[in-house]
């Protein structure tokens, strides 16, 4: 097929790779414009932008697709379909209508659950047993389009980073299957029941909230690993918790109850197993405790 690819973060790269390996003609790649990154704030292309250039593909980075000129340039590509994976820009109706077979989206949830920007993190935070990825025929509504294919996977104790990577590769394979047999994967309307919305993650949500159950606090550590990183503060310094175990028991909320950094929650205890002090590498708890002691009885806000 003659395809346009539209994506921005790492999640989208496996799909782009799969399309190229599958012999499709990717005539243009759309991605978000380069953004300032790292301490030097140097303009840095997105993961998709960088990969597309490695593949020798044309890259376009419009700030918006609302103008008539941008829409005309898109339509002039005369594509069979546009493949979208975490692009990050609204697609106006003229864009959705331009390709022969419309726009197909790789979405990281089992729709209609978790429509929106952060489906992986919200699924973990909610304690869902499983999630998945779907190939959806796009329409004007937020992730409301009919679904052509789906694949599910258990969440278990996966971090958001690990789960996102798994879904990215599942989605890439699913998209290739749909394009290989388009008529064999008819678009099926989403159920009207079970709709939930995965709102964008706010940095403030990453602060560990010990007034919740230990199970919920542990979910925070996984949902925000690797970014923005769940954390607590001690003596004005931030400590990121990248993994933790849960134990039964009761204590004063937010209090460290032993010399193993076990913290009392509203129900149960949480014990970090991988922790990172500001400006330092992440390390297992045992290594951290050799050089960092937070006394038993300390109350963490």
Image: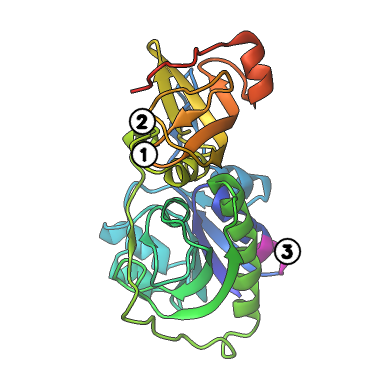
Q: Is residue 145 left or right of residue 23?
A: left
Which quadrant does the N terminus fall into?
A: bottom right
- Please tell me which residue is depicted at 55% across the width and 78% down the height of the picture: 149
Residue at label 3?
21
Query: Which region shows up in magenta?
Result: 18-22
User: Callout 1: few (<14), some (14-19), or many (20+) C-alpha neighbours within 10 Å?
Assistant: some
- Tell whether position 58 is magenta: no
Q: Residues under labels 3 and 2: Cα distance?
A: 53 Å
- Chief SS of the magenta region: helix
Q: Residues under labels 1 and 3: Cα distance?
A: 51 Å
Q: Which mark is residue 208?
A: none
Task: Label 3: state its secondary structure.
Answer: helix
Residue at label 1?
266
The answer to whether residue 4 of the structure is visible from this angle is yes
Query: Which of the marked residues, 3 or 2, is nearer the chain's N terminus?
Result: 3
Residue 220 point in image, percent of width and height: 45, 42
């Amino acid at each position: 097929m003659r395809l346009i690819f539209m994506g921005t973060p790492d999640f989208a790269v496996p799909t782009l790779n799969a399309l190229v390996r599958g012999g499709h003609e990717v005539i243009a790649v759309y991605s978000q414009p380069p953004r300032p990154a790292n301490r030097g704030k140097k303009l840095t292309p997105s993961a998709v932008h960088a990969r597309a250039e490695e593949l020798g593909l044309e890259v376009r980075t419009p700030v918006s697709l609302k103008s008539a000129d941008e829409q005309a340039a898109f339509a002039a590509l005369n594509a069979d379909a546009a493949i979208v994976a975490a692009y990050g820009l609204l697609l106006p109706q003229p864009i959705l209508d331009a390709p022969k077979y419309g726009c197909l989206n790789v979405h990281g949830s089992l729709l209609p659950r978790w429509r929106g920007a952060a489906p992986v993190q919200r699924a973990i935070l909610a304690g869902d047993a499983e999630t998945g990825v779907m190939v959806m025929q796009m329409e004007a509504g937020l992730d409301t389009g009919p679904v052509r294919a789906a694949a599910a996977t258990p969440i278990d104790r996966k971090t958001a980073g690990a789960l996102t990577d798994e879904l990215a590769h599942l989605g890439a394979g699913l998209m290739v299957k749909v394009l290989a047999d388009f008529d064999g994967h008819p678009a099926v309307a989403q159920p009207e029941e079970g709709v939930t919305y995965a709102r964008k993650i706010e940095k403030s949500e990453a602060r560990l909230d010990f007034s919740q159950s230990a199970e919920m606090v542990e979910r925070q550590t996984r949902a925000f690993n690797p970014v923005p990183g769940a954390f607590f503060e001690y003596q004005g310094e931030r400590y990121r918790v990248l993994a933790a175990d849960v134990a039964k028991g009761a204590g004063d909320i937010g209090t460290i109850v032993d010399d193993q950094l076990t913290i009392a929650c509203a129900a149960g205890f949480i014990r970090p197993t991988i922790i990172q002090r500001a400006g330092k590498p992440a390390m297992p708890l045992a290594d951290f405790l050799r050089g960092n002691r937070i006394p038993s009885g300390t109350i963490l806000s």
